[in-house]
Amino acid sequence: MRKNKENFSIDLASQKLKINVNNIWQKKKFKDRENLSSLHRWSWVIKLLSKTKNSPNLKEKKLIEDCLINWCIKYYNTKIEKKNIIFEPYNISERICNYLILIKLQILKPNNFILKNLEKQFIFLIENIEYYKFRLSNHALNNLRAIYLFSVLTKNKKIQKYSFNFINYLLS
């Protein structure tokens, strides 16, 4: 685990949380399950960065990367299954997309350990798209968005085409 005792405040779905790199992934009880989802979707990073008009400095980038690496260390050997809120397909989709946004915006450089961890979730996501026959679902679209973006990053043309065609099917 990467260590840093400096506290910072993050915005979740309906509450603020004061944390640091060491305690961010310790078990927490929330009244609203969306706060737990928000924490594990890594959307708090985007919110944290959007608070300032300046680009994040090296210290802030390291803090973010350390938090994400610590998440991967903590959950590396956890069985990925839908009944675990952390690994619900929608949450996996958000986590993948948020990380790819951080890379694309050059806030973080691609980290092989994080990417390997997300790749396991990506495979699970492909097998567990939240698709409901004859119903357009924002969850299915979000799942496919993450699948498409991750396949672009990994240059997997077959999965890119599959996800793009599936999105077109859902929207037609």
Image (cartoon, helix red, strand yellow):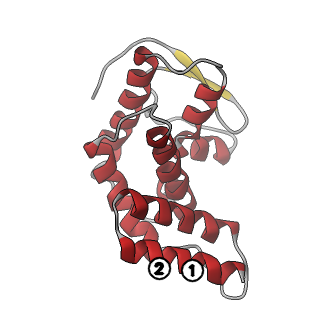
Outermost residue on the bottom side: it is 134
Residue in the image at 38% along x and 22% along y: 62
**Residue pointed to by mark 1:** 166
Which of the image's four quarters has the C terminus?
bottom right
Category of crowding for the residue at label 2, using alpha-carbon neighbours closer than 10 angstroms: few (below 14), some (14–19), many (at least 20): some
Residue 10 image-quadrant placement: top right
Q: Nearer the viewer, residue 71 or 159?
A: 159
Vertical placement of 24 versus 60: above or below? below
Q: Nearer the viewer, residue 134 or 31?
A: 134
Residue in the image at 46% along x and 44% along y: 99
Q: Give the amino acid at mark 1.
A: Phe
Residue in the image at 58% along x and 47% along y: 37
Residue 27 percent coordinates (x, y): 47, 36
Vertical placement of 171 versus 79: above or below? below
Q: Is residue 83 visible?
A: no
Q: Give the amino acid at mark 2.
A: Tyr
Image side of residue 18 versus residue 81, left or right: right
Residue 81 image-quadrant placement: bottom left
Residue 15 image-quadrant placement: top right
Real-space CA distance between mark 2 and mark 1, rounded to the nearest whole angstrom: 6 Å
Q: Is residue 142 visible?
A: yes
Category of crowding for the residue at label 1, using alpha-carbon neighbours closer than 10 angstroms: few (below 14), some (14–19), many (at least 20): some
Secondary structure state at the residue bearing disc 1: helix
Which of the image's four quarters has the N terminus?
top left
Residue 80 percent coordinates (x, y): 38, 61
Vertical placement of 164 versus 29: above or below? below
**Residue pointed to by mark 2:** 162
